[in-house]
Amino acid sequence: MLGENGAGKSTLVKMIYGLVKPDSGQMTLRGAPYAPPKPSIARQQGVAMVFQHFSLFEALNVAENVALGMENPPPMAELATRIRAVSEEYGLPLDPDRLVGDLSAGERQRVEIIRCLLQDPKLLIMDEPTSVLTPQEVEILFQTLRQLSREGTAILYISHKLEEIRALCDAATILRRGKVVGTCTPREKSARELAEMMVGQTLTPPARSEKPKGAVALEVKGLSVKSPIPFGTTLKDVGFAVRRGEILGIAGVAGNGQDELLLALSGELRSTRGAVAIDGKPMGDQGPNERRRAGLVAAPEERLGHAAAPDMSLTENALLSGAIRKGLVKRGFIDWPATRSFAEEVVKEFDVRTPGIHVAARALSGGNLQKFVIGREISQSPTVIVVNQPTWGVDASAAASIRQAIIDRAADGAAVVVISQDLDELLEIADNFAALNGGRLTAPRPTQGLTVDEIGLMMGGSHGMEVAHHVHS
Amino acid sequence: MFILEKRPSPSRFWTAATPVLAVVLTMIAGGILFALLGKNPVEAIRTIFWDPLFNPQFAAYSRPQLLVKAAPLILIAIGLSLGFRAGIWNIGAEGQYIMGAIFGAAVGLAFYPADSVFVFPLMVVAGAFGGWLWAMIPAILRTRFRTNEILVSLLLVYVAQSILSSMALGALRNPEGGGFPGSRNLSQYPAAANLELVPGTGLHWGVIAAFIAVIAAYILLQRHILGFQIRLSGEAPRAARFAGVRPNSLVILCMGISGALAGLAGLFEVSGPAGQISIDFASGYGFTAIIVAFLGRLNPIGILLAGLLMALTYIGGELAQFMLGLPSAAIQAFQGMLLFFLLAVDMLSNYRIRLLLRRAAP
């Protein structure tokens, strides 16, 4: 099943899994009417699902996590044996005694998959399973899915990544704005044709600027800092430089230090004085406002609660990070009229759909709030822009306008760091490319000419997930 | 079946209406309680809410008492509300109130019997300092060692009460008091006395300080970046760090302000209505102010009204005790209900109740 963010894919599969009750219509499972009132009934009837966001407890081990998702878990020793057996059978090696907190994202996904396989499902639903995987890990997953399919398990695979659908699926159904807009055999269509069916319009890739780059605006060297987040990743000796006009893309599987890198660059996490220099000024030990004064703005990944306060109005949220560079505070007192006009300006210029600037941030849709957050940062005429996951969960047209805005700001002479898990996005907009792996950053390389294999290796290959597939195939 | 549904944005109507609804529900539940005690509920409610203000027999005494009782509540609650908004829970205002009184009174007594216009201002500074100092203990323990400020500030109340007893019996005892515990009466020492400024109104310097605190807090929260940072820290702590707020500085600041205001309230009380440092000086204002802060929605204007209302239930409660013979425990339960109902109906501002007609399962 193919569709862009917000097309209704997740809602549909939640109905199949019994999490959401449809208003009307019927479903048929293996010839019989099917209307699961809750997930446990769906599981009884042979439907299993691997969610996009894992529901695992980091402080428990693999076997305990699996047991938590079962109706009548067998004794732990027996369960561990079964986990080992199933995981080897499907080429997904997994140690039942390891703590989930110590596993990589790919390994955590294996826990979810094995939890499903233990129920011997007839239908396996996978919701965007590859967003947390390196290209090599994706290949391992696909081999497992092909094996399951050969053994007679139906697989409903949900994605907005066209190449995956073309590589894996026998048939595709395309959703747009909650409606089926077509079905096809994906191997017979080009990625471009599929994309246009999915979006419903002709897509124009963002225009890259080919201007020469300026002086170094952001320099990071020897940045090592411990994560403030439990089970977080420690940054180890991270170093790079970004010139004015340049976009540096930083890839990596989730949980390899992206959040920590953003905090260390924005100033929420302080390091040593010389570790971060903005326009030549050492700023590593300074806080967010000092760095804003020096010209650096940042947009964290989590929109609600980090980049914006959910219950505050857009005006108040404009003040949140705009106070310094837009001069919205005079001698400690807030200039509300100026703040309101700044908020209005962001809303207008970045096409934020909202009834007004007085509404609470949480009332906006994800895409609109993200446009507001990115717009708020880049309207402050910064010299350095750092963004983490700028288009996560944003629909295609909003994502395109956000990317274009970032490219435009770089063309105007800002140095930009884009941290993202979306490889296509990075390849589309970044001049140089680096990857985070276990808190270390690879040396940046020019994006042009990079192959998918090289990128995969920069991201850490298959993260120690050596596979047993060659035994089977 | 009823379901609770989160509102897309908080309802302005219910935010304003819930305190009123809570008062009405308290009157109803309180009336039932009084009826069960064999009293006429209508008469009891009228004695508590109406008689102190309008009964010709009592109003002359009760009305000035309203400001006298409300001022410390408002002063303390304003300070607490700033911390509460930022997610900093100073529960020990009672202790800071006591320490402010001791520090202020000690300065006044040290000058006795000198007559100077500087004595009272010095006492005010000392009172605020005493409360501030007492609040700094939980604040610094929290920022340095990550202790829980709720526990530390609360337990320090009992320490302050012991210091109070020791002062009343020892260092500050009136040398001419014939060995009785308690200090000299400050209200009879003109240079240190905090007397009624306009006869028959109850207006003293503490009332003026409370009004100034309400206005200052209002401006701080509406117009000043510090007030914005306080609100932001309470609503979204990570966003506050992103906005450049240093959580530790905010803890020191909010605890300091609430401690200093509680200390001021103690000083104005000891130099005026109470008059002296005595063993039973602590009267629970520091704890009641927590109710006042929440009843007033942590909003300065709301706190002003809530403080007056709470003072009214105190005065009316006393009246009901000797007029109708209601036990004092019943009055305390009545005041507690107010907070209980407020918290219970509070969810209406963020949630709405919907009647869900459940379809038959297929």
Image (tube, coloured by chain):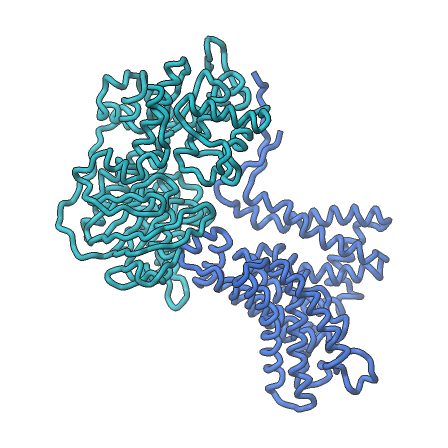
Chain colours: A cyan, B blue
Camera-side residue of B113 and A193: A193
Q: In this view, does B52 lie above or below A75?
A: below
Residue A355: name its quadrant: top left
Q: Residue at x 81, y 50 (%)?
A: B34
Where is B155 relative to A366, above or below?
below
Estimate the x, y position of residue B217 in percent, counting from the top left: 53, 64
Q: Residue at x 47, y 14 (%)?
A: A26
Residue sitting farthest toward the front: A471
A263 or A406, which lies in front? A263
Residue at 48 percent across and 55 percent down: it is B233
> Which quadrant would the N terminus of chain B be assigned to in this image?
top right
Q: Quadrant of the C terminus of chain B?
A: top right
Residue A448 shows up from this direction: yes
A466 on left or right of B317:
left
Image coordinates of residue B266 in percent, x first then y, are: 66, 72
Q: Tell me residue B182's x, y (percent).
A: 77, 78
Residue B190 lies, with reference to residue A243, above or below; the image says below
Residue that extends furthest to the top in the rendered view of this protein: A31
Residue A364 lies, in percent from the top left, at 41, 41
